[in-house]
Image (spheres, rainbow, N blue to C red):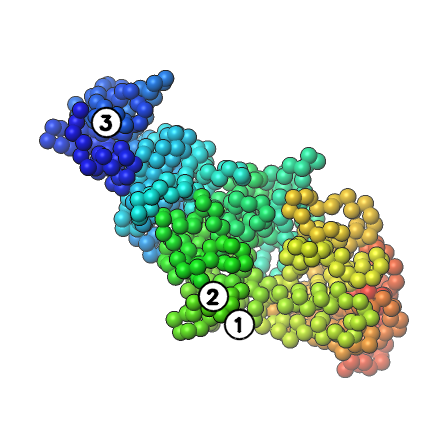
Amino acid sequence: MLEMTPAMTRLVEGRDGDPFALLGPHDTAEGKVVRAFLPGARAVTVLAADGATLGALSQTHPAGLFVGTVDRAAPYRLRITWPKAESETEDPYAFPPLLGPLDLHLIAEGRHRELGRVLGAHAMKVEGIPGVRFAVWAPNAQRVSVVGDFNGWDGRRHPMRRRIEAGVWEIFIPRLLPGTRYKYELLGPDGATLPLKADPCGGQAEKSPANASVVPDPMPPRLEGLQGPSHSPDAPISIYEVHAGSWMRHEDGRQLSWDELGDRLVPYATGMGFTHLELMPITEHPFDGSWGYQPVGMFAPTSRFGNPDAFRRFVARAHVAGLGIILDWVPAHFPTDPHGLGHFDGTALYEHADPREGFHQDWSTLIYNFGRHEVRGYLIASALHWLREFGCDGLRVDAVASMLYRDYSRKAGEWVPNIHGGRENLEAISFLKELNEAVAEHAPWATVIAEESTAWPGVSKPVSEGGLGFGFKWNMGWMNDTLHYMERDPIHRGFHYDAMTFGLVYAFSERFILPLSHDEVVHGKGSLIAKMPGDRWQRFANLRAYYGFMWGHPGKKLLFMGCEIAQDREWNHDAAIDWPALEDPMHLGVQRLVRDLNRVMATTPALHRRDADPGGFGWVIGDDRANSVYAFFRYGTSADPMALVVCNLTPVPRISYRVGVPRAGRWIERINTDAAEYGGSGLGNGGAVMTEPVPAHGHAQSVLLTIPPLATLMLLPEGG
């Protein structure tokens, strides 16, 4: 038996961090030597490509180390005799390094924008041989191996080549196929074996609760040309927020697949007049109850609804229907699950080591280290992956406020100030700017939306002008103020009149989206209809009036699924929307109203074209506290007819209520939320009113309106 060297001992003990220095073909004084480590094998023969025998390897260690000389240098494969079978395959340790110097340089700089095509597992041919290339970033590990069903999950079998320039480990394993399950086994810097890790850049994963990574089918060419509708500040945007697992289900409780969602969700959303779907996070995540907001697979669509190509088909079907796809995307934090990113190589690699910076107390999650180049590059490459590889139209960045402030949800002494002694997270700010600049450069069709709940200035201002560079920002203040107002008994609303007007003080400081999101209908908050005061009729009327006010208000619109049918119960991620409620005319009426509000907004430039421009709005009545009446104009360009929005937020009808208008003639009632088809009383103005030469509110003309109880009217001048 051959005398064992220290390197051989480390190899058979699973401690060798440089396996290619020992395994595979090597020139020695005795000639060309081939070494293979195959625990459990009985015999190994080296074959040429034509099947000729080049040599036999002798077992030099009982753990499975085989060594022998070959007749000549030539491409070869190994014939391996196992106790109950025989196999033939090329030697993984006979292949050269695969990642080029430019790739490694860009990875180390954190500027590789196609990380999903470089790291992770990729089925490909190398030197004409099919197999899978694996690559993973783990700079502080002593050894990294790929493990899976193909090697009995034995970390000694396929230790990887270390590319020290970037802290990346790689290996090509021939003859593996897409669908192969795998993880990484790592030894930390102290030599301890870590829990098996899923692939941070893996493109596919097992279906939860299993958590291995899966080799995906080769990524097809990028989707080019076919995209969703415009999301420019002057475009009509109405977003339907959806949790894919609970929008609709089969009768037996099974979730719909991506193809089934394409069959049902896409036509439903377009039929309702929505312009975009916003999907709650579909990045792979271990816990259903996190709704996807604690992801472990930032490059992998969750396997709950099908494989990655099925998701691509879903996006394409949405685009064919004229529907844009926005994804909730979570770069703020990640879960502590052992197979995830936490302490990935035995060190705080993706997260901060100091829990005052690296641990989120509210969610018991880990916070990314935005000051590390490779971590920033990883996240930005993830964002671009969804936009470029799957063709999505935008990302909604979750929990931006938690990223911007070092003391977010922390008491004194529980956080670390920045280098200037302040509370601003300078590294996160820099990351967000870099993210938005990268999207503008590499996916210029896409938008990035901030869910930011504070008054941080310039969120949607360009980076070049000192802003963060987002396309839009959720208007959380508007949502809170107006919902609290609508929850009040109408008899008290006069004392809180300003809650509905205050949003106009800052409405044009950002490019805003008005959100009625999932956050408002969970955790005991009840449904939107349940928040409304009064008897059943009044609750529905309140909700319809509120929707009318929202669609008339400056800002793009977002509505969570189920809210469009006034679902009675709060959202449950384990159950579908209460679709049978539509058998009730009151619920059906709310659905019809939302559909018509979307259609009127889309076809009325004044209701969308100047959402972010103070010149697109003008108060007519913003001080009638006694009657809780509001009236305002929306303006488009000079060629667009204006729109008049009037709200009566008491249960008392206002008869012959005079409102000044700048244009004489007939005004058409485009929306009356009290219409009988919406479940209302049918009170209104017969579809139109004529002006009178009676001055009011600074205008020479005025109209006498019948404003129904708890209702919103939208009127346009006849003829444009």
> Can you give x and y, in whole percent of width and height, for residue 262 in the image?
62, 41
Q: Is residue 575 left or right of residue 197?
A: right
The reply to whether callout 3 and callout 1 are in contact (CB within 8 Å) is no
Single out the residue that lies furthest toward the top.
84
Decide which of tag 3 and tag 1 comes sooner along the chain: 3
**Kind of residue sitting beneath label 2:** Glu
The reply to whether callout 1 and callout 2 are in contact (CB within 8 Å) is no
Decide which of tag 1 and tag 2 comes sooner along the chain: 2
Instruction: Tell me the mark number nearer the camera, choosing from 3 and 1.
Output: 3
**Kind of residue sitting beneath label 1:** Pro
Instruction: Tell me the mark number nearer the camera, choosing from 1 and 2.
Output: 2
Tell me the SS state at disc 1.
loop
Label 1 belongs to which residue? 457
Label 3 belongs to which residue? 61
Label 2 crowd (10 A; few <14 / some 14-19 / many >=20): some
Residue 331: tell me if it is visible.
no
